[in-house]
Image (cartoon, grey):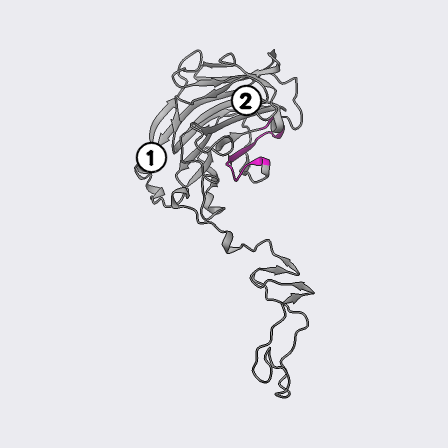
């Protein structure tokens, strides 16, 4: 709300006689200099908003506002009938085979070193992943491996399954216990906008074992991520996530991402809710992304309450991964 100036003791125009100075002019009509406006003895610039003698944080100097080039505005200008969208299956793994994950569809991130979160596991290349009985089983174990005290797997589809927009559905049963940190998530394939978080991250599902049955749905971008306290996220309690399979999914459109569990919409990230003209800083999600499946051990979030050394091994079981794309969305985003 714009505040009016409150001027200190100023002359009051009293039309007693024409010999008195009237409203900033002498009786002869000659202009006299007006004193600089003050507020409680403090000089006041009437072009700004004030609270007491201070310029309000809400004031924006028009001279400092830069026009965003149209080609840098993201997640706006798309027109489509959401209720009429159709989807075709374009990529899937039903895990209807035995042995190691299909190398035509999956690769591995390997190594230890904390992965930016002070995690405790060493990710191996296949030693902690197998397909049997129609399920992909990722296993985290308490065992020495290099400089790490635990081993696990981070399976990735990069270079083998990369998508721009669509529905990504993963049916999974999660590990349990203090220190487990499973995730079903996505990262940029080409990192066009720069290193994390500039090129974005989509967390389809995260769970930490010390907070059993609370599922977290999140995005990370340059403007919105946890380290600066701006992360966009939603948490929902879903009973039995470590005893039963659930579908964790996103519907990724050119102007928003909708997060689902078991076909129920849980959270929608739409950047225009937070900024009228988003750029890549709020919407880096206009480039191909790939899928990651992993169990981390400990770390800055999973290990907040320590790691229970008596719960291992722990597994995340995946029943299927299915990716669908809409021909209507493909047509308007070519």
Residue 295's disc is: 2
Q: Nearer the viewer, residue 70 or 20?
A: 20
Does residue 140 appear in the picture of this structure? Answer: no
Provide residue 248's location: percent of width, then percent of height: 47, 30
Is residue 293 in the magenta section?
no
Residue linked to disc 1: 326
Q: Is residue 324 above or below residue 28?
A: above
Is residue 55 found left or right of 252 in the rendered image? right
Q: Nearer the viewer, residue 115 or 270?
A: 115
Is residue 209 in the magenta section?
yes
Residue 166's disc is: none
Question: Mark 2 and mark 1 in contact (Cβ < 8 Å)?
Answer: no
Provide residue 97's location: percent of width, then percent of height: 40, 14
What range of the chain is rendered magenta? 208-227
Provide residue 250's location: percent of width, then percent of height: 44, 34
Q: Disc 1 on helix, strand or loop?
A: loop
Q: Residue at x 42, y 23 (%)?
A: 158
Q: Residue at x 49, y 32 (%)?
A: 201
Is residue 49 found left or right of 291 in the rendered image? right
Q: Nearer the viewer, residue 249 or 40?
A: 40
For the C terminus, the image quarter is top left
For the N terminus, the image quarter is bottom right
């Amino acid at each position: 709300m714009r505040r009016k100036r409150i001027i200190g003791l100023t002359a009051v125009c009293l039309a007693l006689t024409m010999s008195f100075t009237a409203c900033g002019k002498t009786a002869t009509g000659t202009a006299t200099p007006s004193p600089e406006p003050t507020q409680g003895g403090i000089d006041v610039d009437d072009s700004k908003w004030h609270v007491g003698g201070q310029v309000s944080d809400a004031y924006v100097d028009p001279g400092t506002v830069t026009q965003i080039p149209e080609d840098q505005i993201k997640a706006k200008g798309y027109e489509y009938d959401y209720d009429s969208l159709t989807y075709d299956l374009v990529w899937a793994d039903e895990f209807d085979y035995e042995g190691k994950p299909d190398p035509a569809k999956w690769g591995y991130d390997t190594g230890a070193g904390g992965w930016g979160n002070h995690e405790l596991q060493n990710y191996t290349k296949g030693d902690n992943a197998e397909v049997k009985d129609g399920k992909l089983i990722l296993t985290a174990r308490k065992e020495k491996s290099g400089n790490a005290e635990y081993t696990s797997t981070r399976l990735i589809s990069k270079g083998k399954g990369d998508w721009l927009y669509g529905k990504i559905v993963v049916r999974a049963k999660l590990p349990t216990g203090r220190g487990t940190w499973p995730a079903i998530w996505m990262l940029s394939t080409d990192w066009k906008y720069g290193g994390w978080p500039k090129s974005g991250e989509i967390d389809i599902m995260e769970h930490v074992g010390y907070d059993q049955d609370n599922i977290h749905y999140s995005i990370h971008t340059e403007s919105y991520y946890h380290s600066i306290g701006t992360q966009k996220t939603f948490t929902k309690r879903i009973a039995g996530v470590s005893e039963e399979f659930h579908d964790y999914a996103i519907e990724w459109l050119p102007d928003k991402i909708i997060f689902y569990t078991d076909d129920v919409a849980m959270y929608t990230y739409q950047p225009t809710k937070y900024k009228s003209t988003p750029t890549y800083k709020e919407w880096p999600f206009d480039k191909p992304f790939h899928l990651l499946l992993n169990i981390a051990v400990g770390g800055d979030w999973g290990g907040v309450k320590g790691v229970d050394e008596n719960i291992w091994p722990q597994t995340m079981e995946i029943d299927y991964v299915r990716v669908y794309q809409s021909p209507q969305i493909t047509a308007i985003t070519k």
